[in-house]
Image: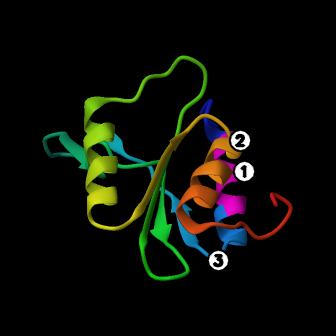
Amino acid sequence: MSAEGPLINACLIFLRMQGCWVDRLNTGAMRIQARGRRDRFVRFGRPGMPDIVGIGPAGHYIGVEAKRGITRVTPAQTAFHQEIRQRGGFSAIIRSVDELVAAWRARFGSVKGAWT
C-alpha cells in the first residue's frame, strides 16, 4: 500500500457517505514482456489525474488528490484540478480527511455522517 493508501481509503469512505460514486484510480506506466515479441511500454491514466475520481450525488465530476508528508503537487496535477473546477466539478488536493471535509463543506454547505 502506498504512503497515501490509508488517507485515500478514509477519503473514499467519506465521499461514499456523501452519496458519491467514487473509486481509487491508479496512474502510471509499466513495461509488458511478451513472449516472442518486443517488450511494450504501456501508460494508464493521464498525467495529473487525481487519486480518487467519480461522480457526485448531483452528477458532477469528483477528483481528489491525496498527499502525505512532504510530497508536492506536480504542475500536471495542478492543471488537472483547475480543469475540473473550471468545468463545474469538485476538486480537492488534501493532506487529511479533515481538509476534504472542509473543502466539501465549503462547496456544498453540509456533510452527512460522523464528520458533521
**Which of the marked residues, 3 or 1, is nearer the chain's N terminus?**
1
Residue mark closest to the camera, 2 vs 3: 3
Residue 19 — which label? 3
In the drawing, does residue 31 fall left or right of residue 105?
left
Secondary-structure class at tag 1: helix
Q: How is the image coloured?
A: rainbow
Quadrant in which residue 75 is drawn? top left
- Which segment is the magenta one? 7-14
Amino acid beneath label 1: Ala
Residue mark closest to the camera, 3 vs 1: 3
Mark pair 3, 1: CA separation: 15 Å
Question: How many neighbours does mark 3 have within 10 angstroms: few (below 14), some (14-19), or many (20 or more)?
Answer: few
Q: Which residue is mark 2?
A: 6
Amino acid beneath label 2: Pro
**Which residue is at the far right?**
114
Name the residue at 26% across, 49% down.
46
How far across and how far down the image is residue 16, in percent? Answer: 67, 69
Q: Is residue 54 visible?
A: yes
Residue 10 — which label? 1
Amino acid beneath label 3: Gly
